[in-house]
């Protein structure tokens, strides 16, 4: 690290080796990401901004940054990053890959500067705030949970997706796409599924008599996710995973372009039928049938074991 950096505030923890059963559960997502990125080269020194407040990584018109004193106070031993440059460079790669996969590379290349700042907060919730942009400038703040970052499970690619795709009419679409990108682009264990195949999680909950009432509560009569559900952390986690699983299903079967047409629509429920030839209810039935093959693939005890190992 370079000396003479001033800035903001933060705290620390660990991550354990998953048992064999847990490793098998995360193989699918990690292997996908392995084909996208080569291991990020470790820089010998972090670059400091002109005002001395931030570590920065620049790539063409994209600037990723983090406050020096927030970063320096973090316990990075289990985070997966040796320095700020490694973290920021990986974040920039996520941004560029998500833009490429969604056909937004050209749109974002037209900005004079894209500035994304990472903040670290004492919370279990990570959030993204897109700031007013003008004169070719594009800005966003991403707040990551200190605890989750220090355990190496912060949803970084998820939150970066929110900078490109603000929440729209449908909460389930709005959280499904970022969760999909966390799996495909990053592949690292992170909220909401901690590297476990979302289809396995959803099959466990969807076909369980014990969870039937909770699952029913999560879905509205239209089949979308009820915003009130998001106030309960357990139900929110399940809702995110249902959204993720359905997004994987939609993109795998109908393609990214069609999915994004639905995502950006002011009336997504009618566009589902225009794009796929099926109503949302019919698509949900097909998705449920798809999940049948994942019944019994993972147990609640195995899920607890995976998550506890990540946080030990």
Image (cartoon, helix red, strand yellow):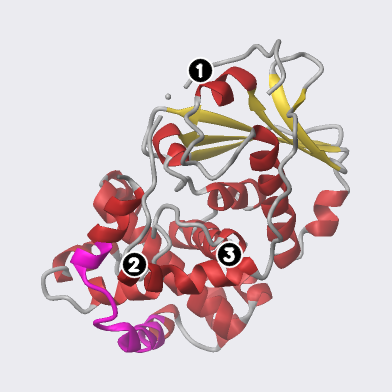
SS class of the residue under badge 3?
A: helix
- Give left or right: position of 260 versus 238: right
Give the x, y percent position of residue 209.
12, 75
- Report which residue position mark 3 lands on: 263
Q: Earlier in the sequence, mark 2 or mark 1?
A: 1
**Magenta stretch: residue 289 in it?**
yes
Q: Range of the magenta residues?
A: 284-303
Mark 3 crowd level (few <14, some 14–19, many ≥20, 10 Å Cα):
many
Quarter of image, res 38: bottom right
In the depicted view, which residue is nearer to us: 151 or 257?
151
Contact between marks 3 and 2 (CB within 8 A): the answer is no
Please state, as top left, top right, bottom left or bottom right, where the N terminus lies in the image.
top right
Q: Nearer the viewer, mark 3 or mark 2?
A: 2
Left or right position of 308 against 157: left
Packing grade of label 1 (10 A; few <14, some 14-19, many >=20) is: some
Q: Main secondary structure of the magenta part?
A: helix
* Distance (Cα) linking label 1 and label 3: 36 Å
At a point 85% along the width and 41% down the height, the residue shown is 61
The residue drawn where x is 58% and y is 64% is 263
**Residue 269 visible in the shown view:** no
Q: CA distance from mark 2 to mark 1?
A: 34 Å
Secondary structure beneath dot 2 equals: helix
What x and y, as percent, mark residue 164? 67, 51
* Position above or below: 312 against 129: below
Q: Residue at x 43, y 68 (%)?
A: 26
Q: Where does label 1 land, which residue?
A: 9
Q: Which residue is mark 2?
A: 22
Q: Position of residue 137 (x, y in %)?
A: 81, 34
Q: Quadrant of residue 271?
A: bottom right
The numbered mark, 1 or 3, whose residue comes first in the sequence reads 1
Q: Is residue 64 magenta?
A: no
């Amino acid at each position: 690290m370079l000396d003479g950096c001033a800035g903001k505030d933060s705290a620390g923890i660990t991550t354990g080796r998953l048992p064999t059963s847990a490793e098998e559960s995360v193989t699918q997502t990690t292997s996908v990401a392995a084909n996208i990125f080569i291991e990020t080269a470790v820089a010998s020194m972090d670059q400091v901004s002109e005002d001395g407040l931030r570590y920065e990584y620049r790539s063409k018109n994209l600037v990723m940054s983090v406050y020096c004193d927030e970063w320096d106070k973090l316990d990075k031993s289990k985070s997966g990053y040796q320095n700020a440059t490694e973290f920021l460079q990986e974040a920039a790669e996520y941004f560029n890959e998500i833009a490429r996969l969604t056909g937004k590379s050209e749109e974002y290349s037209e900005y004079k500067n894209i500035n994304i700042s990472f903040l670290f907060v004492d919370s279990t919730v990570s959030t993204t705030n897109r700031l007013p942009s003008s004169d070719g400038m594009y800005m966003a703040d991403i707040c990551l949970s200190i605890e989750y970052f220090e355990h190496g499970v912060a949803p970084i690619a998820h939150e970066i997706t929110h900078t490109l795709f603000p929440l729209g009419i449908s909460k389930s679409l709005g959280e499904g796409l970022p969760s999909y990108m966390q799996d495909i682009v990053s592949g690292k264990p992170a909220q909401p599924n901690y590297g476990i195949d979302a289809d396995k999680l959803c099959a466990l909950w969807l076909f369980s008599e014990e969870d039937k009432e909770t699952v029913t509560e999560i879905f509205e009569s239209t089949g979308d996710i009820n915003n009130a559900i998001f106030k309960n952390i357990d139900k929110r986690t399940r809702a995110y995973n249902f959204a993720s699983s359905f997004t994987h299903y939609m993109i795998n079967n109908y393609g990214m372009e069609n999915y994004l047409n639905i995502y950006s629509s002011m009336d997504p429920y009618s566009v589902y039928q225009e794009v796929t030839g099926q109503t949302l209810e019919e698509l949900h039935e097909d998705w449920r049938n798809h999940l049948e093959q994942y019944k019994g693939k993972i147990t609640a005890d195995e899920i607890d074991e995976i998550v506890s190992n990540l946080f030990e």
